[in-house]
Image (spheres, rainbow, N blue to C red):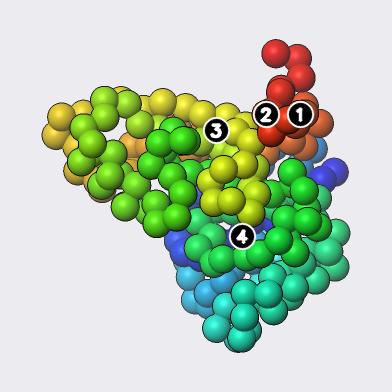
Amino acid sequence: MLKIAVLVSGGGTNLQALIDSEKRGELGCGKISLVLSSKPDVYALERAKQNGIPSKVLSRKDYATISDYSRALVDVLVSEGIDLVVLAGFLTIIDEQVYQKFPNKIINVHPALIPSFCGKGYYGLKVHEAALEKGVKVSGATVHFVTPECDAGPIILQKAVAVQDNDTPETLQRRIMEEAEWKILPMAVKLFCDGKIKVENERVYIKGE
């Protein structure tokens, strides 16, 4: 059994998708063993409590620097014996200490088809506002490994979602979550836990495909 830590900063909708998938037996040999929040009193912590998952608050404001925070985060993850780290709406900057300790063991879901609408400044509704402003006909979500360069790590899975003429950033955000994020994030976690992901030259290869 591989131990999964889900890092959150808000409501935890992607966390809920992972919890639901685990209950259906769809995370393979993975188990959500820790929910860690960078903020106190967020609803994601209530989701963890309701489902009997241990949780911890590691508040960014309690640490003077990104380096100090990253060191504390590594200490928690290592002490809990975590095998896979999932960033699920985790909006706190971390540094290379974390990436070096967990190489190709940190995954993130981004609400666009990378390399479109990604990188610094593209998060939350800002992603969907940019997509609609550009007039794209298709958007979607990407699950990728996390590296020091924002949204630039090896891509694991992507799923496209059609953009409708009457979409607002809010409606597009919701549809991408429902049709893409909540589906491919658990799928990527299962692939990792089942040992089916291989990374070579910054590209992901899925064994058996």
Marks 2/1 in contact by CB < 8 Å: the verdict is yes
Q: Nearer the viewer, residue 98 or 197?
A: 98
Q: Which residue is mark 1?
A: 200
User: Seen in the image, is 192 located left or right of residue 11?
Assistant: right
Q: Nearer the viewer, residue 104 or 85?
A: 104
Q: Residue 148: x, y in percent? A: 64, 54
Q: Quadrant of residue 185?
A: top right
Marks 2 and 4, Cα distance to the nearest angstrom? 24 Å
Q: Which residue is mark 4?
A: 7
Quarter the C terminus occupies: top right
Whether residue 159 is visible: yes
Q: Residue 107: x, y in percent? A: 64, 46
Residue at image location 77% in from the left, 48% down from the top:
103
Marks 1/3 in contact by CB < 8 Å: the verdict is no
- Between marks 2 and 4 in the image, the one whose residue lies nearer the viewer: 2
Q: Which residue is mark 2?
A: 203
Residue at image location 46% in from the left, 35% down from the top:
115
Mark closer to the chain start, 1 or 3 = 3
Number of other residues with Cα within 10 Å of mark 1, as a class: few under 14, some 14 to 19, many 20 or more: few
Marks 2 and 3, Cα distance to the nearest angstrom? 17 Å
Marks 1 and 4, Cα distance to the nearest angstrom? 26 Å
Three-letter code for the amino acid on which mark 2 is drawn: Arg
Marks 2 and 1, Cα distance to the nearest angstrom? 5 Å
Q: What is the total number of numbered labels drawn onto the structure image?
A: 4
Marks 1 and 3, Cα distance to the nearest angstrom? 21 Å
Q: Which residue is mark 3?
A: 184
Q: Residue 193: x, y in percent? A: 77, 37
